[in-house]
Amino acid sequence: MSIFLGDFIKWDPKKVYQEVKKAGFKESKKAKTGLYNFADLDDDFISIHHYLKWYKFGFTRLFDNLSIEIRNKRLNRSKAIKIILKNKAKRPENDIKKFCRFTNISISEFNKNLEKFRNKSIWKKDKKGKWFIKNFLSQQYSW
């Protein structure tokens, strides 16, 4: 059984970060995955987990983080969409390489397996064979 703390208390990552920073926690220079440079720092493979959400559901950790910022009224939807369109779904190349070494598979094999998770009900191919999500955030956008 798993317990998600956010089901029981109002979880605000920025407030939690401010508290742990007082105790000596150090953030990264840039975000490992998503928006926050203080989250997911202790796991080399968490970025792969979040990247798989892109293939399966059409969103990434960045969307999760921006949703929190909107709910906490630090950001509006329009600005969040601009951030998403600017950043796209960044492939965590270094972590993929580490994962492939750890599991003793090639990057080619990883990519082949990754494709198995692509949700064909949301992803379509254009005439050139490039995958896209139709009407992604109110526009056709290929990745």
Image (cartoon, grey):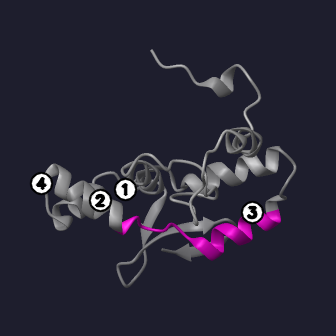
Between residue 27 and residue 98, name the one nearer to us: 27
Dots 3 and 4: beta carbons under 8 Å?
A: no
For the residues marked 2 and 4, what is the alpha-carbon distance in whole angstroms?
19 Å
Q: What amino acid does circle 4 point to?
A: Asn
For the residues marked 1 and 3, what is the alpha-carbon distance in whole angstroms?
24 Å
Between residue 108 and residue 125, name the one nearer to us: 108
Secondary structure of residue under mark 2:
helix
Which residue occupies the extreme top position in the image? Answer: 1
Residue stretch in magenta: 78-93
Q: Is residue 101 left or right of residue 91?
A: left
Q: Position of residue 34 (x, y in %)?
A: 58, 57
Q: What amino acid does circle 2 point to?
A: Glu
Residue, disc 1: 118
**Magenta stretch secondary structure, dominant:** helix
Chain-order first, disc 2 or disc 4: 4
Front: mark 3 or 4? 4
Chain-order first, disc 3 or disc 4: 3
For the residues marked 3 and 4, what is the alpha-carbon distance in whole angstroms?
38 Å
Between residue 16 and residue 63, name the one nearer to us: 16
Secondary structure of residue under mark 1:
loop
